[in-house]
Amino acid sequence: MSVEWYLVLSALLFSIGAGGVLVRRNPLVILLCIELMLNAGNLALVAFARAHGNQDGQIFALIVMVVAACEVAVGLGLIVAIFRRRLPIDVDELRELQG
Amino acid sequence: MAEVFFFLAAIGALAGAIGTVSLRNPFYTVLALVVHLLSLAALFLLLRAEFLAAAQVIVYVGAVMVLYLFVVAYVGGADDPLRAAGSPRLRWASALFAGALFVELSIAILGTGLTALGEEGAGYFEGFGTPAEIGRLLLTDFLLAFETASMLLLVAAVGAVILARRRTGLEDRQEISVGDLMRSGSRDTLTGGEAGTMIEVEGPPGR
């Protein structure tokens, strides 16, 4: 398989994730769509690592996974805090920070 | 043979992604993402990233997704209300934006001057992407990134605990304010019988 296929697949997955972030309103699902986008980026990184025969891209993807895990931990903590305060779990209703 | 596996994994990844975006129930959304991540691990294997594929399965599917499932169960996996009535135009604009993004990325990928992208990829040596090689790189060339990642994980864990804890205020006798202890400790000291008991920890009685 040529590397182009992997890159096009990664672009498609990234677009699907971006569309999901725009369409969905549940912050949990938006976090999941961000995961989709991060993983699409990971796929592109690993594909480039394969194209160059160099493992640096794989290390980069590993660090991206760490950052994604951190983002999940903080994001889920925020969602639990929102739930505890009896606020609606809906990004359209949570607009007090909008100014 | 690699083509067959690639298309199987790609179809799985696409189906998982579409399911993640379109399913109403957050519980099923998480399960669709699990399918997506497993297919992606298969793609990583095809790209000779063995360690990354294993980490994907263990860290993502094993740990992060379980965290998601716990939060969905805690918050209540109620169905997302279908409130498209107010903004069907916005929804179409979002889909249009995603499509435009894909077209743009595809033009960038297919129209690139990098001729190597049309090939199978450069040659790889024995042990490419194995845990031993990745570990060697992490502890030599990328030590700074490795240590920074550990620090970031620690900060995120502490932040998540502080964000998600119960806020009950200092009226709760479980929480101890050192400032209160210092202030009141100068006025009335503990009697001998109380020293060494739990009253000492909670501060003087009658506070």
Image: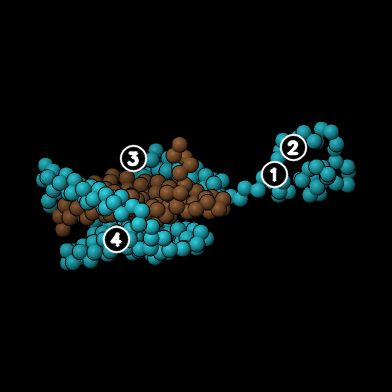
Chain colours: A brown, B cyan
- Residue at the image position 39 percent from the left and 38 percent from the top: B144
In the rendered structure, find residue B141 and report the number of the disc placed on it: 3
> Residue B61, percent across and down?
39, 61
Circles 4 and 1 on the same chain = yes
Q: Which residue is mark 2?
A: B180
Q: Chain of mark 2?
A: B
| Residue at mark 4: chain | B
Badge 1 is on which residue?
A: B170
Q: Are marks 4 and 1 in contact (CB under 8 Å)?
A: no
* Residue contact at pointers 2 and 4, CB within 8 angstroms: no
Parent chain of label 1: B
The reply to whether the C-beta atoms of the residues labelled 3 and 4 are less than 8 Å apart is no
Do the residues indicated by labels 3 and 1 lie within the same chain of the protein? yes
Same chain check for tags 3 and 2: yes
Q: Residues within 10 Å of mark 4 (few under 14, many from 20)?
A: some
Give the Cα distance between marks 4 and 1.
47 Å
Amino acid on which disc 2 is placed: Asp
Q: Is B196 situated left or right of A70 in this image?
A: right
How far is disc 3 from disc 2 in space, using C-alphas? 50 Å
- Residue for point 48% across, 45% down: B156
Circle 3 chain: B
Residue B123, image x, y percentages: 17, 51
CA distance separating discs 3 and 4 = 38 Å
Disc 2/disc 4 C-alpha distance (Å): 55 Å
- Marks 2 and 3: in contact by CB < 8 Å? no
**Considering only order in the chain, which callout, 1 or 4, is on the residue closer to the N terminus?**
4
